[in-house]
Amino acid sequence: MTKRIIFTGGTGKAGRHAVPHLLSKGYSILNVDLKPLHLPGVNTLIADLTDSGQAFNALTTHFGFEGFEEGRVPRAPDVVVHFAAIPRVLIEPDNKTYFANVMSTYNVIEAAMKLGVKKVIVASSETTYGVCFAEGDRDYHAFPLEEDYDSDPMDSYGLSKVVNEKTARAFSMRYGADIYALRIGNVIEPHEYGPFAEYVANPPVRKRNAWSYIDARDLGEIVHLCIEKDGLGYQVFNAVNDTITADMPTKQFLAKYAPNTPITREMGEFEAPLSNRKIREVLGFKEQHYWRNYLPK
């Protein structure tokens, strides 16, 4: 039977690549957002997920007019993918960013659990590692950045994502559901590789992203792998590509550009400092979009 997926925030930067990828895998998808996606085969329900009533209704609605032909009332989806959020600081006031991201996530997960949904995937962020939106030049605690890192952001966006991870964990334990939180790296769309040559030439500009990234199309595949991998309970996964965005091996690079940060394990020759080892080993992720392939010839 075709899995029915509700994807919140499918109109956003990551979602507009992830949703078509999931559609190509044969899923039935409803996008829930504040703006339409305009993707054939995927309807958009306009909803404010900071309102618990709207969140509950969004998870119990027909995906399209064809639903009325089934002769039964709408039912909850098989999977919820929750990407809807204010996507960074400096778009809305800090308190609104925190409120919107925390309450929408709480409302969506609560509704999913009480409706019997057994799989929820939520968008967390690289900002939980505390450097991306830090005040001033701040060092990471250690490399590689892995999922057991002591998350300590000082900004409203990163803080909201830490809270969302705790919310996901609490509901997973209470309801025995699979809830996977993706710590998504700097999302790069296909047209955004132009500056990478400059990044390589001026390494400090990428410190806040830990010299790492995630291609939006590869992120769609990570979501697909999460949908298909059952039985893990609560999990956090770094959602990033394989390699450091630099012109020298990782160990040599970090010794030069992050000399005060300890290295806690042997890293791959060009392994990204924000490591995706867990999604490779647990989910079987295989990168398809290597940044060097998109540099100008």
Image: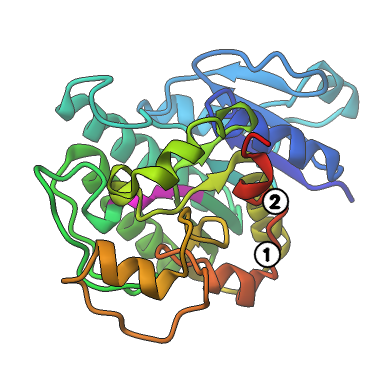
- Residue sitting nearer the eye, 11 or 238: 238
Name the N-terminal-most of marks 2 and 1: 2
Q: Which residue is mark 2?
A: 221
For label 1, the residue is 285
Is 75 located above or below residue 70 in the figure? below
Residue drawn where x is 89% and y is 51% of the image: 1
Residue type, label 2 = Glu
Residue 64 image point, x, y percent:
77, 20
Q: Do callouts 2 and 1 mark residues in contact (Cβ within 8 Å)?
A: yes
Residue drawn at (49%, 39%) of the image:
196
> Can residue 141 be found in the magenta stretch?
no
Residue type, label 1: Phe
Label 1: how many residues lie within 10 Å, few (<14), some (14-19) or many (20+)? many
Please identify the dominant SS of the magenta region.
strand
Colouring of the image? rainbow
Q: Residue at x 86, y 21 (%)?
A: 66
Residue at the extreme left: 136
| Position of the C terminus by quadrant | top right
Q: Position of residue 83 (x, y in %)?
A: 50, 38
User: Looking at the image, which residue is at 40% across and 32% down?
Assistant: 85
Q: Please tell me whether residue 65 is drawn above or below residue 118 in the rendered image.
A: above
Magenta-drawn segment: 122-127
Is 30 placed left or right of 3 in the picture?
left
Residue 255 percent location from the top left of the image = 28, 72
The quarter holding residue 102 reads: top left
